Amino acid sequence: MKTNKQYLKWCARQSKGIRIVKESTNLQKAYLKKSTEALRSMQVNAKEGINDWVISTSYYAKYFAIYALLSRLGIKCEIHDCTIAIFGYLFADKLPSFLEGLQQAKEDRVEAQYYTTSISIDSQKIVSETKEFVLKIEEIIDNLNPQMISDIKSKLKKLVQ
């Protein structure tokens, strides 16, 4: 996964790439709800031993939590790799293992959804790590203040302009 500045600039040039938009607590709440629903689905699938969907719903629970955070910040991006790269650029210094976990979850989801190989997983570990990830993102959202939001948007604006 590319998280370098050139890649982010490329993302900003794409029609569905990085955009600075109005901050939205409504979208933030909606995406956190989607994240929570993905968590619930992941737990049901884990209980039933449906590993492909444990993997997929784990990724989407994480992705929707990130999208909620970006919505709260006033950042929009409809390209998954670019969204992950933005998260990495803005938060990797604070959450390096979470960035790695998100990148791995995306790779695992692609493998599970698009290929027919059987995947052996520790579903309880995935459930636990996914819950931890989503809770940490919710904590970041809860701790945001107007100055932090302004600083983060300024950092991104400097990069993509």
Image: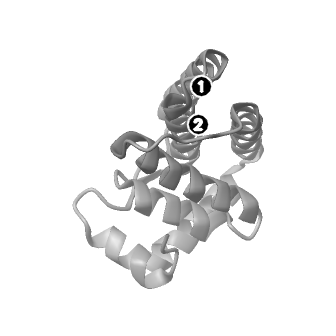
Earlier in the chain: of badge 2 and badge 1, it is: 1
Circle 1 — which element? helix
* Quarter of the image where the C terminus is located: bottom left
Tell whether label 1 touches label 2 (CB within 8 Å).
yes
Residue 51's quadrant in the figure? top right
**Callout 2 environment at 10 Å: few (<14), some (14 to 19), or many (20+)?**
many
Colouring style: one colour
Q: Residue furthest left?
A: 15
Give the residue pinned by disc 1. Answer: 42
Circle 2 — which element? helix
Q: Kindly report the distance in space between the C-alpha atoms of the residues bearing marks 2 and 1.
A: 6 Å
Give the residue pinned by disc 2. Answer: 58
Q: Is residue 80 left or right of residue 64?
A: left
**Residue 10 percent location from the top left of the image:** 33, 76
- The residue at the point 71 percent across, 43 percent down is 133
Q: Residue furthest bottom?
A: 6
Under mark 2, the amino acid is Ser
Camera sees residue 22: no
Under mark 1, the amino acid is Met
**Residue 54 percent location from the top left of the image:** 57, 31
- The residue at the point 48 percent across, 74 percent down is 2
**Residue 156 percent location from the top left of the image:** 51, 70
* Number of the label disc, if any, that sits on residue 157: none
Q: Is residue 60 above or below residue 76?
A: above
- The residue at the point 37 percent across, 62 percent down is 18
Q: Residue furthest front?
A: 118
Q: Is residue 86 left or right of residue 17?
A: right
Camera sees residue 39: yes
